[in-house]
Amino acid sequence: MRFVIQRVIGAEVKVNQKIIGKIDKGLLVFVGICGSDTEEIADKMLKKLIGLRIFEDENGKTNLDLKTVNGNLLMISQFTLYADCKKGNRPSFIRAGSPEMADALYRYIIEKGKEAFPDIQQGEFGADMKISLINDGPFTILLDSDQIC
């Protein structure tokens, strides 16, 4: 599982020109799910995400987590995080989870995330989404379950 985490001062996701998710200050998280991912891995990734201290304190140090700053969370499914570009110029997505499996795990992640952030915002699995954001910093982190689980 991979999370691309961007600290933002605002982000929104549209489907068919309609806003379906929008946040102010917080984290925009792109979620990539591979075929071997499980709910156990998702739980560990969420715990790490929620605990990340990547917001500045009064001294300008990245020392505060999302809850402490009353931040928001927008999570977007993105299978392209498992693009394999080793051969040729056309990426392969063979490592990405099947649509059925990835959708179920993405829904699990959203529901578990709501335990910490009841107003979690989300994209629409499998849809053509248009995402706008204002990156704060910029501050972008890649969490890969191969490195933390």
Image (cartoon, rainbow, N blue to C red):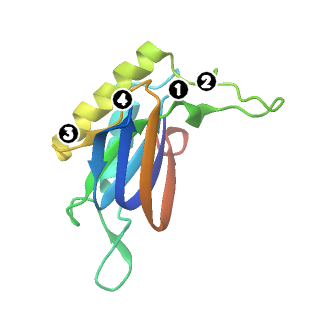
Task: Name the residue carrying label 1.
Answer: 34
Find the distance from the CA under tag 2 to the CA under tag 4.
21 Å
**In the rendered image, which residue does mark 2 sit on?**
95
* Mark 4 crowdedness (10 Å alpha carbons): few <14, some 14-19, many ≥20: some
Circle 3 packing at 10 Å, graded few (<14), some (14-19), many (20+), is: some
Q: Residue at x 33, y 86 (%)?
A: 59
Residue 25, picture quadrant:
bottom left
Q: Check whether the beta carbons of the residues at disc 2 and disc 4 lie within 8 A of each other.
A: no
Q: Report the Cα–Cα distance between label 1 and label 2.
A: 6 Å
Q: To which residue does mark 4 refer?
A: 124
Q: Distance between the residues labelled 1 and 3?
A: 22 Å
Left or right of residue 145, residue 111 in this image: left
Question: Does the residue at mark 1 contact the one at mark 2 (Cβ under 8 Å)?
Answer: yes
**Measured Cα–Cα span from mark 1 to mark 4:** 18 Å
**Which residue is under mark 3?**
114
Q: Which amino acid does label 4 sit on?
A: Glu
> Of helix, strand and loop, which one carries label 2?
loop
**Disc 3 secondary structure class:** helix
Question: Is 117 located above or below residue 42 in the figure?
Answer: below
**Residue 47: which numbered mark, if any?**
none
Q: Going from the N terminus, do you reach mark 1 or mark 4 first?
A: 1
- Marks 1 and 4 in Cβ contact (< 8 Å): no
